[in-house]
Image (cartoon, rainbow, N blue to C red):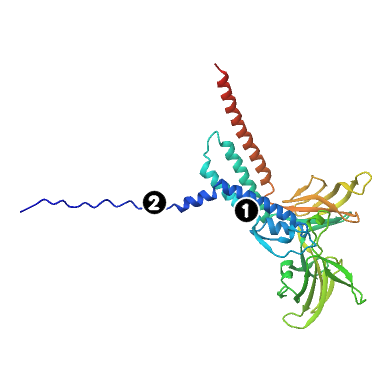
Amino acid sequence: MITDQKTPTTPPAAPPPPRPDYSKKVLDFFGSLELTVWLLTLSIFLIFFGTLAQVDQGVWTVVKDYFRSFVVWVDFQIFFPRDRLVPGNFPFPGGWSLGGLLLINLVVAHLQRFNLSKQKIGLTVIHAGLILLLVGEGLTGIFAKESHMSIDEGSSSNYSEDIRHPELAFVESADAETDLVTVIPDSRLRSGQLISDPRLPVDIKVDRYFKNSVMEPNPDGQPGFQARQVPEVSGTASAEGGIDMPSVLVTLYKKDSTEEIGAFTTSVWFRSSHQLEIDGKNYAMSLRFARDYKPYSLYLKEFRFDRYPGTEIPKNFESNVRILDPENNVERDVRIWMNNPLRYRGETYYQASYKPDETGTVLQVVNNPSWLIPYISCVVVTLGLLLQFGFSLSRTLKRRKKRITP
């Protein structure tokens, strides 16, 4: 007997759950408005911490440690009076980290939420200007160089000095017109290690390095001076013209041996060099600010300034200089005064200060390949604001006209 039997049907399998799109989550995070608010808040705190740190540290130290770094260790001491010792510190994102994340946040948010249209073209232009501003600051931090050129009236100079970085120089007079100069940068002087290089006439052991120092007479009555370490010039003092005056204590040895030549104290305070005779050759050893030699020179014809009536405060700094550039056959007179710099061969010379005895000028020399980017950024942002407000005003006037028209 044959009977019909129903074959049980298997229920369809449930579709697998959708796999999470982690890439979208990452993009949503980096383009979120919440991240923008957090980054701007952290930037405000970073500026606040950097401002407090300038009570004890120099401006350029704070710029390097706080605003041109990825992570900064903020000392608890900056929040308390200096007569109370508060140890410890905590990590905080530095300027490179916050600026880089803001740039990523701005680009991702624009690509995700802003479509190119007539109504939003102003926002697009504004964002492009802000991106330029962030990129310009990054390039400035990486490539910009600042130094100072001091010139006595009636004299000329063909080099500028970086007052933030000293160097130990050995100068050998090859002939009446040529000097052979070998320098050791401050990064190697700070290490405290034995410095040996085939270009140096001696081996050097750095015994002490003082970032800032004062010179005092020897306590035992012997002729000469000794260096004493003092705190670096703070941000408030550097605004008044104070700078760090480094000193270094070194012991010199004959090349590739332990035979000691002598121990020396050298400092940027000293105007004269240590004269050394090594293997029949004469050398001058000195600690000086790092020099940047130019293929041209500036001759100071006249320096003058006025003072505010009834005070010793100077105003209207002015330097009349002559550019002497035989390589390009240039010889012309230029006037440099406040907010009117000289731009020549990729460098900008600002009237910065004057020598304490008022016998010469101090020019700030800036080499910044990206100097034009902030100006372009401001123009672009202004154009974007005008476009955005213009379209908004146009829409408002059209809606008002429709309400008024019967």
Residue located at (62% from left, 46% from top):
132
Question: Residue at point 52% right, 44% down?
Answer: 111
Which kind of residue does numbered mark 2 sit on? Answer: Pro
Instruction: Please tell me whether mark 1 sits on a helix, a strand or a loop.
Output: helix
Let me know if residue 60 appears in the view. Answer: no
Question: What residue would you read off at disc 1?
Answer: 98
Viewed as shown, does residue 266 lie left or right of 187?
right
Residue holding disc 2: 18
Amino acid type, mark 1: Leu
How crowded is the residue under tag 2: few (<14 C-alpha within 10 Å), some, or many (20+)? few
Instruction: Pick the residue in front: 302 or 223.
Output: 223
Is 5 situated left or right of 41 in this image?
left
Residue at the far left: name it.
Answer: 1
Q: For this rendering, which residue is in front, 126 or 264?
A: 126
Specify the quadrant of the image occupied by residue 195. bottom right
Q: Is residue 205 above or below residue 374?
A: below
* Quadrant location, the N terminus: bottom left
Residue 31 is marked as none
Element type at marker 2? loop
Q: Quadrant of residue 385?
A: top right
Q: Is residue 221 left or right of residue 118?
A: right
Answer with left or right where residue 40 lies relative to residue 324.
left
Coordinates of residue 63 in the picture (x, y in percent):
71, 56
Q: Quadrant of residue 70?
A: bottom right
Vertical relation: 36 (above or below) 266: above
| Viewer-side residue, 331 vs 293 | 293
Say which residue appears at 93% left-offset and 47% top-offset.
Answer: 311
Task: Give the x, y percent position of residue 181.
Answer: 77, 68
Neighbour tally class for label 1: few under 14, some 14-19, many 20 plus, Cα within 10 Å: many
Q: CA distance from mark 2 to mark 1?
A: 35 Å
* Dot placed on the residue nearer the N-terminal end, 2 or 1: 2
